[in-house]
Amino acid sequence: MIGTMRFIILMCIISFATYASAQPVTEQNASNKAMKYLDEGVQRAMMKYFDKALISFENAIKEEPNFVTAWQYLGDTHRNMKNDSMAAECYLKVIELDPAGDPFLYMKIAEAEGNMGRYEEALEHIVIFLENPSIKGDIRTKAIKQRKNFEFAKDAVAHPVDFNPQNMGEEVNSAFPEYFPSLSVDGSVLVMTRRIDDIISMGPGDQRPIENEDFYITYYQNGSWTPAESMGEPVNTKLNEGAQSISADGRYLFYTACDNLETGFGSCDLYYSIRIGKQWSAPENCGTIINTADWESQPSVSADGRELFFSSARPGTLGSYDLWMATINEKGYWNEPVNLGATINTPYSEQCPFIHPDGKTLYFSSEGHPGMGSADIFYSTRNENGEWSKPVNLGYPINTKNREISLSVSSDGKTAYFSSDRGKEKDDLDIFSFELPEAVRAEEVTWVKAIVTDARTRQPLRASVQLLNIGSGQTVATSYSDPQSGEFLVVLPRGNEYGLFVQKDGYLFYSENFQLQQDMPDAPYIINVELQPISTGEILTLKNIFFETASADLLPPSVPELTKVLDIMKKNPNMRIRINGHTDNVGTEADNLKLSENRANSVRNYLIEQGIDGTRITTKGFGESKPIDVNTTESGRANNRRTEIEILGL
């Protein structure tokens, strides 16, 4: 406020000191020649001949140096030409000549100074504007928003964050603009939108140049990116495709396509394509639950594939564009999208959501939250109740007075990818990467990546994949392995213990256990899943059966795996099994033998209680006699403490 009062006093001194010698000239007392130049300038400006309009207004000022109207029109013309420094000087001259004149000049000066990054001066001028009691309604609301932006920007510039963006190189970027980078969770696949020059035929002899948006894909191999190639048909077409999101496993592509009269429902709709082996399927519209007659764009699919975030102007939107989220129901269909609410959305525009693989950190672009003046990138986190935290600006110079929109972040939360024209011609965008400040990083995740094959033939299999939170029993993710390659990838957020189940009719299921309650593993889990055909003699190790320490009492987290054993026995009513119990070597050999027998019997009793005929189940305890790992480490001992199902007959 001290700066504001100093400015007001200065203006008053200038006004008083120049009053006698600098009487303002208006249209009522200007010379005929000055008025002629003024009228000429107005006509030129209305026709958008701004360069010529400048000359006319400058000539009017030469005739009448204190011509208030000419100074204001000269400032407006510079403003239209984005000559912010000149516009501000002209408006200050108008205030000097006529301090009690148009109060909106202070707002215009503030806007120009904000565009130049002179936030302290801009803040002073917008405060003066707001002190005028005649400023009301939408104009006051807009000015208050600008004041908040200037307050934020002033502080942000004074406290910049570390920012060192690196161009991703010629393998990724080209002479054409590239933008909207999206990566698979393992960082091996990058898909981007590239705007290329093309030719479209409108008929015989009518070839027209156009700019066409297509998808390009590059792979990280042997420490570098492969040269980006067009994804080709059927995904790329003569229409524009863009603003895509590749799924965590790299097998689903959600994207935006506009003006598709054959399959679209609105101006822009969301579509998806599935990769089977190396081939992408024909795109499908996401349907009328997701798409409306309004604008839907910029999808981001969650790592578990069960949530789809996007920007839309559909009914119920709080501003021009809002962020929405749809979830998949038990039947595999999308539920009605819900607005992310007033914590995220504002009366202005929110776009370009990116939901991190941790499932709870959302990055997005907003024009409504306090920022550097245009669209800035923010992040928000979701708590266990599904509530979003107050958005946090990523800071300066990640955000600038220019428009920052699209960002994606690596699985470890450290590296961000975005598009920029820095170092190139305006609008000639390249993909850059940079290290995110720690304060705005998402949580690190890891993943399990596997190939599912028949244990005998070694041929790839399409099998269902289920990831459970062992503590809560809730399903974290479901998927299928690729029928041609057998591949699947499932993301594992930190902080929980997970059970993984892979199953297919006619085969014994496969299970794994991942403990991520505290430390993350040094590397992702890369495994081979060999499903065993159901046949006599096969042995299935149950990796998610849990007992009280030194006890045979089953713990509740064992239920999901036991349920899968029940399912197999019910589907194979003639199956007879033996439950084998094993321990590590801690304790006496006799005690371990007894414990292994008791634990095997506990599993048998549970199955009988659930309706399985007891004559189909025998048990045997082996104690510590058949280790499959060393007993010198905790992980080795854990592997040795196991329960097995051995098929005795069918």
Image (cartoon, helix red, strand yellow):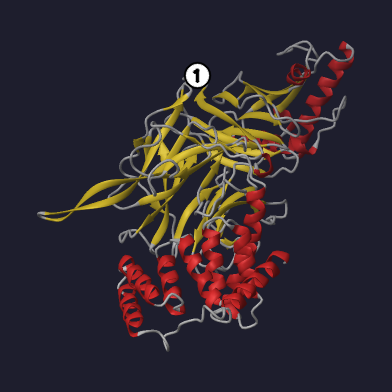
Q: Which residue is rendered at x = 58% and y = 39% of the image?
A: 163
Mark 1, secondary structure of its residue: loop
Against 359, residue 452 (above or below) is: above
Q: Is residue 554 left or right of residue 236?
A: right
- The image shows residue 303 at horizontal and vertical percentages of 57, 42
Q: Which residue is rendered at x = 56% and y = 76% of the image?
A: 18
- The image shows residue 64 at horizontal and vertical percentages of 41, 77
Quadrant hosting residue 509 = top right
Give the quarter of the figure containing the C terminus.
top right
- The image shows residue 606 at horizontal and vertical percentages of 77, 35
Q: Is residue 359 left or right of residue 264?
A: right
Residue 425 appears in view: yes
For the residue pair 357 and 9, the one nearer the viewer reads as 9
Q: Amino acid at mark 1?
A: Arg
Residue 369 appears in view: no
Q: Which residue is mark 1?
A: 456
Quadrant hosting residue 337 = bottom right
Q: Is residue 158 left or right of residue 479?
A: right
Q: Which residue is rendered at x = 52% and y = 49% of the image?
A: 300
- The image shows residue 128 at horizontal and vertical percentages of 64, 72
For the residue pair 373 and 516, the one nearer the viewer reads as 373
